Amino acid sequence: MIELLSQPWPWYVAGPSIAVVMFLLLWTGKSFGVSSTLRSLCSIGGAGKNCDFFDFDWRSQNWNLVFVGGAVIGGYLAAHFLSSPEPLQLDPRTVEELSELGIAFDGSFLPEDLFSWSSLLTAKGLIVMVLGGFFVGFGTRWAGGCTSGHAISGLADLQLPSLIAAIGFFAGGLLMTHFLFPLIF
C-alpha cells in the first residue's frame, strides 16, 4: 500500500479531487488561496493595529489556517513516509540544461546547488532570495491573490481577473525561466 502511495497520482484521480474541493468551496461561498493565510496570521499577531489591511475578522478565514496546517503535515508525512527511495527521473535534456547553468542534478528534488545553506549564504543567493521574495509578495498583493487562488479557485469561478492574473503568472514564469534565470546562473 505504501508503495502505491509513493507514486504520483494519475491525472484522473488528482484532477477530479481538486474539482470536488473547488465545487465544495464554491458551494459554501468560500474561495481558495494560500496567501490569505499569511494575512490571517498577521491579523492574529496584532498587525491590524498598525495596518488597516490586516484589520479584519480572521476567524471568518480560520479554515485557511486548517488547510495550510494540513498541507504542512501532509508534506511532512509524504516526505518522510511516502516518498520513493528511487532518484527522481528527469528528461536528459533538462539535466543537460541544468548543467549548462552550473546546477548539478543528483536525482533529488532539491539540488544542492540551489537549495542549501552554502548556496543561500552567498551574495547571489541572498539577492535571489530577497528580490525573489519581494517580487512574489508584491505580485501576490498586486494581483489580489496567489497562483493557487487565481489559477484554481478564480478560474473555477470563471473570474476574468483570475484569468488575466493566471496568464500573467505563466508569462512571468516563462520570462524568468528562459531569460532571467540563465542571466542569474
Image (cartoon, rainbow, N blue to C red):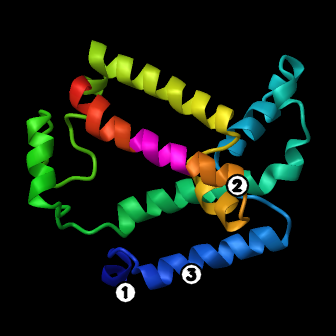
Secondary structure of the residue carrying tag 1 is loop
Tell me, yes or no, whether the highlighted magenta stretch contains residue 172: yes
Residue 92 rendering spot, x and y as whole percentages? 9, 58
- Residue at the (35%, 36%) spot, across then down: 176
Residue 102 rendering spot, x and y as whole percentages? 12, 33
Q: Amino acid at mark 2?
A: Leu
Secondary structure of the residue carrying tag 3 is helix
Check the image and name the residue furthest to the top.
Answer: 123
Task: For marks 3 and 1, give the one nearer the viewer.
Answer: 3
Secondary structure of the residue carrying tag 2 is helix
Horizontal arrangement in the rendering, residue 114 relative to residue 52 (left or right): left
Determine crowd level at label 1: few under 14, some 14-19, many 20+ residues with C-alpha closer than 10 A.
few
- The residue range painted magenta reads 167-173
Q: Amino acid at mark 1?
A: Met
- Residue at the (29%, 13%) spot, across then down: 123
The numbered mark, 1 or 2, whose residue comes first in the sequence reads 1
Question: Where is mark 1, residue-wise?
Answer: 1
Task: Say if mark 1 contacts mark 2, CB within 8 Å.
Answer: no
What is the count of numbered marks? 3
The numbered mark, 3 or 1, whose residue comes first in the sequence reads 1
Residue 128 rendering spot, x and y as whole percentages? 36, 23
Question: Where is mark 3, residue-wise?
Answer: 16
Q: CA distance from mark 1 to mark 2?
A: 42 Å
- The dot on residue 160 is 2
Q: Give the vertical position of 16 relative to 81 (above or below).
A: below
Q: Quadrant of residue 89?
A: bottom left
Horizontal arrangement in the rendering, residue 115 relative to residue 163 (left or right): left
Q: Amino acid at mark 3?
A: Pro
- The dot on residue 110 is none
Horizontal arrangement in the rendering, residue 82 relative to residue 153 (left or right): left
